[in-house]
Amino acid sequence: MEIQLEQVAKKFNKEWIFRNINFTLSESQPTAIIGPNGSGKSTLLQVIAGSMIPTSGRLHYRHANKQISADQIYQYISMAAPSMALPEDFTLGEFLAFHFKFKTLKSGYHLDDLPDIFRLEQARDKYIKNFSTGMKQRLKLGVAFYADTPLLLLDEPLSNLDHMGIAWYLEEIDKVLKEKMIFVCSNRMDEYPFCKTFIDILEFKRP
């Protein structure tokens, strides 16, 4: 996977959130988008995901020697973010069956394996509305890790995780470092110790 950002900028009303971002990144470069709260990190992640159109500039996506259009990139993406909602009236098993109708599960795994991997083995028949915030976060991260997609986008991945959840996150991310192109949107260094490339959003707020 390769993504090129060419003079990418985003403006809301009269305020430039960021401008003139130029990068070419590949799957061998796990990348952290860093900056203080409210600085535009999540906005940039949404632009990369194709769910938000930049005010100016272009993004180019390439995978397996094939150019991918911006309106098709969603097929190649898995994402986890605090703002993402889960279907509260599904049980864990129902949600996994539903989710993986739209995303392909990684080869070598079965849906029945996932509750144990996500450390939710006692919650197979539990409704998601009764999950703790930490359980919900592991579920969001887990389905993103185990979808067969080349691009993984994570926004504040340690939100609501305790120390055991953080250890689980670092173990799981280590498994996919060689498989996926990874972006982590964060202002916490412990969320991206594996990242080799950094986009400091504050550097792109200048005229």
Image (cartoon, helix red, strand yellow):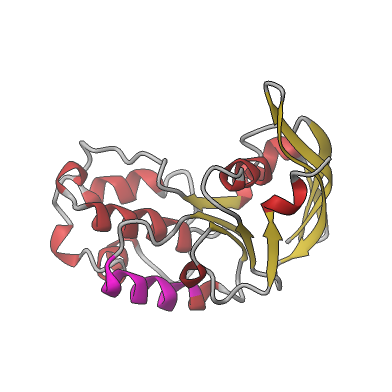
Report the front residue among 64 and 25: 25
Determine the residue located farthest toward the front in the rendered image.
206
Q: Quadrant of residue 30?
A: bottom right
Residue bounds of the magenta highlight: 162-173
What percent of the width, then of the height, locates residue 156? 46, 55
Write the residue at 48% across / 67% down: 191
- x%, y% of residue 17? 68, 37
Q: Main secondary structure of the magenta part?
A: helix
Query: For the point 14% across and 50% down, which residue is it?
Result: 126
In depth, the one of 75 and 200 nearer the eye is 200
Q: Residue 25 appears in which quarter of the rendering?
A: bottom right
Q: Is residue 132 left or right of residue 75?
A: left
The quadrant the N terminus occupies is bottom right
Residue 49, relative to residue 142: is it above or below?
above
The C terminus - image quarter: top right
- Residue 87: x, y in percent? 29, 37
| Count of all numbered marks drawn on residues in the image | 0
Magenta stretch holds residue 45: no
Residue 172 highlighted magenta (yes or no):
yes
Q: Is residue 28 left or right of residue 131?
A: right
